[in-house]
Amino acid sequence: MGARLGIPIGVQPNHAWRHLFKSVARHVRMDREVEGFLTGHRPKNSNAGSDYGDRRIETMSAEIER
């Protein structure tokens, strides 16, 4: 199916979008916690406490608007 869309065989476009998003997030100095939550990644030095509390839409929206 990918070849019909012009995507070369073996390329994983969804994975590439995550890389692009992380590059742009770094460029605009997006808050690392928000960037990690949006991409499904946790900081290497995180612990169970990193999962406590809410992830507010307003906070994530403000970071995305940057």
Image (cartoon, helix red, strand yellow):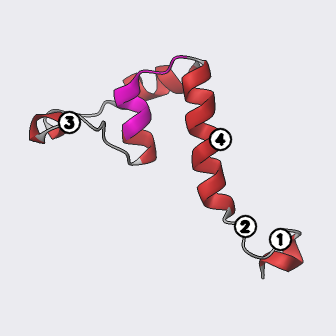
| Residue visible at 41% across and 21% down in the picture | 31
Q: Quadrant of residue 14?
A: bottom right
For the residues labelled 1 and 2, the Cα–Cα distance comes to 6 Å
**In the figure, 24 relative to 39: above or below?**
above
Task: Residue 11: give its label.
Answer: 2
Q: Amino acid at mark 1?
A: Pro
For the residues labelled 4 and 3, the Cα–Cα distance comes to 23 Å
Q: Is 12 part of what is drawn in magenta?
A: no
**In the figure, 30 relative to 48: above or below?**
above
- The residue beneath circle 4 is 20
Element at label 1: loop
Q: Dot 3, crowdedness within 10 Å: few (<14), some or many (≥20)?
A: few
Quarter of the image with the C terminus in it = top right
Task: Residue 46: give its label.
Answer: 3
| Residue visible at 31% across and 42% down in the picture | 42
Q: Residue furthest front?
A: 44
First-in-chain label (3 vs 1): 1
First-in-chain label (1 vs 4): 1
Q: Dot 1, crowdedness within 10 Å: few (<14), some or many (≥20)?
A: few
- The residue beneath circle 1 is 8
For the residues labelled 4 and 2, the Cα–Cα distance comes to 14 Å
Q: Is 31 part of what is drawn in magenta?
A: yes
Element at label 4: helix
